[in-house]
């Protein structure tokens, strides 16, 4: 059974088929397409197929993966964050995306910081990585704010874009 996590304002709930409609909205935002890429998720059938092919297998294999971020006050689905076992990246990739209308409210930091805490304290993860485009300054600032450091530029398999690789690794004193 996959676990949900809470912050003061948010619930991080394992992404499931019940989130298909929300994923259509999220994955078709202009910023998603610009910074993450078009995943060709345009219909309910596409979203369900994406969840079954990409989300559920990792959750079943590792016990964690993608989380839908829900605002407690009204149960609105506002974003997604997760720990992804991504080809070409050493360590788990911590990723996130939020609907435009919920940006600049601290939700992304709150959700991603909680996910990092869970990764370290409950899952025993000692290294996190993240990738982003250089022009995605908001993402870069958030990664730095949660303690990741820019390492180098990389290209991951099946992607032509040059990406900025950030990493955080637990030290002996932590």
Image: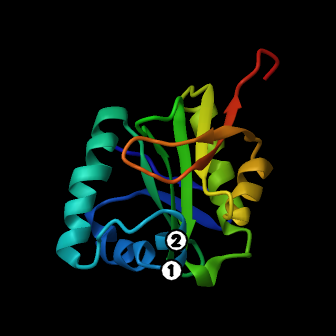
| In the image, residue 152 above or below residue 33 | above
Residue at the spot 68% in from the left edge and 60% down from the top edge:
139
Q: Is residue 111 left or right of residue 40?
A: right
* Placement of the C terminus among the 4 image quadrants: top right
Quick check: can you spot residue 7? Answer: no
As drawn, the residue found furthest toward the right would be 173
To which quarter of the image does residue 17 belong?
bottom left
Between the C-alphas of marks 1 and 2, the distance is 6 Å
Q: Is residue 101 left or right of residue 106?
A: left
Classify mark 1: helix, strand or loop. Answer: helix
To which quarter of the image does residue 63 belong?
top left
Query: Residue 173: x percent and y percent?
Result: 82, 18
Q: Residues within 10 Å of mark 1 (few under 14, many from 20)?
A: few
- State the mark number for residue 30: 1
| In the image, residue 69 above or below residue 130 | below
Query: Residue 12: x percent and y percent?
Result: 51, 58
Counting labels gives 2
- State the mark number for residue 1: none
Q: Residues within 10 Å of mark 2 (few under 14, many from 20)?
A: few
Quick check: can you spot residue 168? Answer: yes
Residue at the spot 63% in from the left edge and 79% down from the top edge:
102
To which quarter of the image does residue 49 belong?
bottom left
Residue at the spot 55% in from the left edge and 75% down from the top edge:
31
* Placement of the N terminus among the 4 image quadrants: top left
Colouring convention used in this rendered image of the protein: rainbow
Q: Which residue is mark 2?
A: 34
Query: Residue 21: x percent and y percent?
Result: 32, 78
Q: Are marks 1 and 2 in contact (CB under 8 Å)?
A: yes
Residue 105 or 47: which is nearer the viewer? 47
As drawn, the residue found furthest toward the front would be 160
Classify mark 2: helix, strand or loop. Answer: helix
| In the image, residue 14 above or below residue 150 | below
């Amino acid at each position: 059974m996959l676990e949900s996590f809470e912050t003061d304002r948010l619930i991080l709930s394992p992404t499931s088929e019940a989130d298909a409609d929300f994923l259509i909205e999220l994955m078709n935002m202009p910023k998603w397409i610009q910074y993450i890429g078009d995943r060709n998720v345009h219909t309910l059938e596409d979203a369900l197929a994406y969840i079954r092919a990409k989300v559920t297998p990792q959750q079943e294999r590792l016990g964690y993966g993608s989380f839908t971020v829900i605002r407690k006050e009204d149960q609105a689905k506002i974003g997604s964050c997760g720990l992804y076992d991504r080809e070409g990246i050493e360590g788990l990739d911590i990723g996130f995306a939020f609907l435009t209308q919920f940006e600049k409210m601290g939700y992304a930091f709150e959700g991603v910081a909680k996910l990092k805490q869970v990764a370290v304290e409950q899952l025993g993860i000692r290294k996190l990585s993240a990738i982003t485009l250089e022009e995605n300054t908001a993402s870069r600032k958030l990664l730095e704010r949660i303690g990741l450091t820019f390492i180098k530029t990389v290209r991951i398999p099946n992607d032509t874009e040059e990406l900025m690789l950030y990493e955080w690794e637990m030290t002996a004193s932590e």
